[in-house]
Image (tube, rainbow, N blue to C red):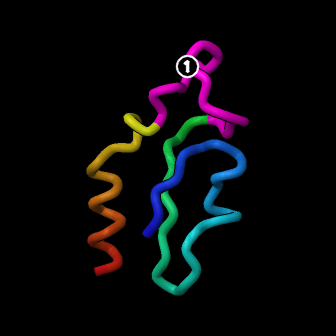
């Protein structure tokens, strides 16, 4: 199980878990180059990753 921000260099396609029961979650926002509060309308993106979604992914794999 991995939780990832949408910054291009941190994407799960590069760093994600590997395995049959893996899961890689990230907020449903566009991929960006870096976190910059003054330039990003999705700066609070990690707050948009709902705990219920994370819990459901964990339950599916336990």
- Image height of 20 relative to 15, above or below: below
Front-most of 4 and 23?
4
Assign a secondary structure to mark 1: loop
Q: Position of residue 40 (x, y in %)?
A: 61, 21
Secondary structure of the magenta portion, mostly?
loop
- Image height of 52 relative to 33, above or below: below
The residue indicated by pointer 1 is: 37
Could you tell me which residue is drawn at 49 percent across and 76 percent down? 22
Image quadrant holding the C terminus, namely bottom left
Q: Specify whether 48 is left or right of 31.
A: left
Q: Position of residue 11 (x, y in %)?
A: 64, 55
Q: Position of residue 61 (x, y in %)?
A: 34, 78
Could you tell me which residue is drawn at 71 percent across and 50 percent down? 9
- Image height of 44 relative to 27, above or below: above
Image quadrant holding the N terminus, namely bottom left
| Residue placed furthest toward the top | 38
Front-most of 61 and 38?
38
Q: Specify whether 3 is left or right of 59.
A: right
Could you tell me which residue is drawn at 46 percent across and 57 percent down? 3
Residue 19 placement: quadrant: bottom right
Front-most of 57 and 44?
44
Q: Specify whether 7 is left or right of 59.
A: right
Q: Residues within 10 Å of mark 1 (few under 14, many from 20)?
A: few
Q: Is residue 12 magenta?
A: no
Q: How many marks?
A: 1
Range shown magenta: 30-45
Could you tell me which residue is drawn at 61 percent across and 23 percent down? 36
């Amino acid at each position: 199980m991995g939780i990832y921000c949408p910054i291009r260099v941190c994407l799960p396609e590069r760093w994600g878990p590997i395995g049959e029961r893996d899961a890689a979650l990230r907020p449903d926002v566009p991929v960006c180059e870096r976190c910059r509060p003054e330039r990003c309308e999705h700066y609070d993106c990690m707050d948009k990753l709902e705990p219920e979604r994370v819990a459901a992914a964990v339950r599916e794999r336990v």
